[in-house]
């Protein structure tokens, strides 16, 4: 009989505490709205099904499996809105015209660009970045490759410097089974 | 009163044929496999032409010309002295070695595909694969319906027999109308020829080839041609002495535009091909229609009309059973 009031008390405390805990949790993970400006050291890499990496002879890096990328006309990856590819998305020889996120970059002889078909959402909690860039696509040679996935990284609120990384298995097309690896780094510019 | 009604065993046999026709697409997984086959045919259609396949063979020749030109350039640079050129261009040396395996393999693959253009066209000219399950289910369902009708309304058997006969004749004629006897064996030959091509392992190998070729082309454009310029050769001289190098350089984007979608189509259709290959042999397909059709016709034909009196003698009217002279005085 004595146990019943104790259970009631426990339930009441839990009912009062849970919303507070949830609020505290959401408060600690702040959504970052703005542009993740792409600085030097950002790259794209493509893993082959056999474990090797695609060597891009046109890469500016000494290790040709890293294709260095630089900021496009929008400065980088914007959260909260989609940075869609223009129409048409390619020129006559298949070079990507999607130039907002990155400057279209030579990959094996044809320039590739990045676009987002849906708004990326990235938040920071205790200096750790997490979120999704599900709508990220790489555009190359008149073809579109889904590159979206979860992103992780680090962020300094003081310097606004960030590092974002992601990997995405390519499904379908000539690079089916390959894995795209991306790394963006630079500074975050709030909206 | 006299009435035709069907014998029971032919009705049972006809019901079995109807069930077999309805059940065959389920047994062979046609509802999932046939649409995959249709998708494969649609995906391959743009590539299965002599013009496109000749184009792919030309692409290989451009690359081969680039390798031969590169070998000649490396020899010339070696002869010109300085550091050994083969040591200066290790990536080209690697590509040269890789190409010696890639070229025969890709050429053989394209030869096989090209040899099957006619077979592909024959299959593509058949009605859409998506319809194939229905070609079995619909006549099967009609046969079952008619057998059911004949069972419950024996009086309608004379008319039902004719409809069944029409269904049977339709099944026999359908493969003739769709030229299945000539087209289906060609489809079987194509499916057999692609057994070693449309596999995940083979497609991955081609994807890796593509990676090797892209790297090799980069070496030609970014290392060998600049080295020749550095050695004092002008653009025109490089063109005339090493035409393979400059041709590959000039055609590279075209090669990429041409080959990558084909590799994509091959990769995207591995599972579709496997679905088609898992169907019964195409050679058998005409017979899947003709044999049930013939059986239906045969069973209808042997179903000679039976008199109702055979099964249940009609009681004689006592009035009629009386002797004609009864009561005559």
Image (tube, coloured by chain):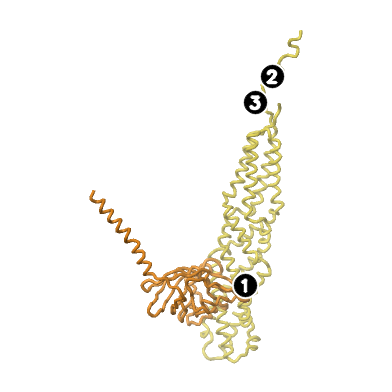
Task: Sort mark 1 into few (<14), some (14-19) or many (20+) by Cα contacts within 10 Å.
Answer: some
Do the residues bearing badges 3 and 2 touch, measured as CB atoms within 8 Å? Answer: no
- Would you name the residue on which mark 1 appears? B258
Front residue of this view, candidates B234 and A180: A180
Picture residue at 62% right of the left edge, 90% below the top: B234
Q: Is residue B209 visible?
A: no
Q: Which residue is label 3 attached to? A: B312
Picture coordinates of residue B232, whole percent (x, y):
59, 92
- Give the mark nearer the N terminus: 3 vs 2: 3
Color used for chain A?
A: orange
Q: Disc 2 on helix, strand or loop?
A: loop
User: Which quadrant of the view contains residue B195?
Assistant: bottom right
Q: Position of residue A174 (x, y in %)?
A: 56, 69
Q: Secondary structure at mark 1?
A: helix
Q: Which chain is yellow?
A: B
Q: Position of residue B147 (x, y in %)?
A: 64, 38
* Camera-side residue of B181 and A77: A77
For mark 2, name the chain. B
Please name the residue that numbered disc 2 is placed on.
B317
């Amino acid at each position: 009989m004595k146990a019943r009031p104790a259970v009631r008390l426990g339930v009441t405390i839990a009912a009062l505490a849970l919303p507070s805990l949830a609020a505290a949790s959401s408060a600690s993970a702040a959504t970052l709205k703005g542009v993740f400006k792409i600085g030097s050291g950002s790259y794209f890499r493509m893993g082959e099904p056999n474990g090797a990496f695609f060597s891009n002879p046109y890469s500016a890096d000494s290790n040709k499996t890293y294709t260095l990328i630089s900021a496009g006309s929008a400065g980088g990856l914007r959260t909260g809105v989609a940075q869609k590819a223009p129409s048409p998305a390619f020129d006559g020889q298949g070079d990507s015209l999607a130039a907002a996120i990155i400057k279209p970059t030579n990959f094996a002889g044809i320039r590739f660009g990045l676009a987002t078909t849906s708004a990326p959402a990235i938040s920071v909690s205790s200096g750790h970045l997490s979120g999704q860039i599900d709508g990220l696509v790489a555009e190359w040679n008149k073809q579109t490759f889904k590159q979206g996935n979860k992103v992780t990284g680090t962020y300094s609120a003081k310097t606004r410097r960030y590092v974002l990384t992601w990997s995405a298995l390519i499904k379908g097309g000539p690079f089916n089974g390959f894995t795209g690896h991306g790394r963006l780094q630079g500074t975050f510019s709030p909206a | 009163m006299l009435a035709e009604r069907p014998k029971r065993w032919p009705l049972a046999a006809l019901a079995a044929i109807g069930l077999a026709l309805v059940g065959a697409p389920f047994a062979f997984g046609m509802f999932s496999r046939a649409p995959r086959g249709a998708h494969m045919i649609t995906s391959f259609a743009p590539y299965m032409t002599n013009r496109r396949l000749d184009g792919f063979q030309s692409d290989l020749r451009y690359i081969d010309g680039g390798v031969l030109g590169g070998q000649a350039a490396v020899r010339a640079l070696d002869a010109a002295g300085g550091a050994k050129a083969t040591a200066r261009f290790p990536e080209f040396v690697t590509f040269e070695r890789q190409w010696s395996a890639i070229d025969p393999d890709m050429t053989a693959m394209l030869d096989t595909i090209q040899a099957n253009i006619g077979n592909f066209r024959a299959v593509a000219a058949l009605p859409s694969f998506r319809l194939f399950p229905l070609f079995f289910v619909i006549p099967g369902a009609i046969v079952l319906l008619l057998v059911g009708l004949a069972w419950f309304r024996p009086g309608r058997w004379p008319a039902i027999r004719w409809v069944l006969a029409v269904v049977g004749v339709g099944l026999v004629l359908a493969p003739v109308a769709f030229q299945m006897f000539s087209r289906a064996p060609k489809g079987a030959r194509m499916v057999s020829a692609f057994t070693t091509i449309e596999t995940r392992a083979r497609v991955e190998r081609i994807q890796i080839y593509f990676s090797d070729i892209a790297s090799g082309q980069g070496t030609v454009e970014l290392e060998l041609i600049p080295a020749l310029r550095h050695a004092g050769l002008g653009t025109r001289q490089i063109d005339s002495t090493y035409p393979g190098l400059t041709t590959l350089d000039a055609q590279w984007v075209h090669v990429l535009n041409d080959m990558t979608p084909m590799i994509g189509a091959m990769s995207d259709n591995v599972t579709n091909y496997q679905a088609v290959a898992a169907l019964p042999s195409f050679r058998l397909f005409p017979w899947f229609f003709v044999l049930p059709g013939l059986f239906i016709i045969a069973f209808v034909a042997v179903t000679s009309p039976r008199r109702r009196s055979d099964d249940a003698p009609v009681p004689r009217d006592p009035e009629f059973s009386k002797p004609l002279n009864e009561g005559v005085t």
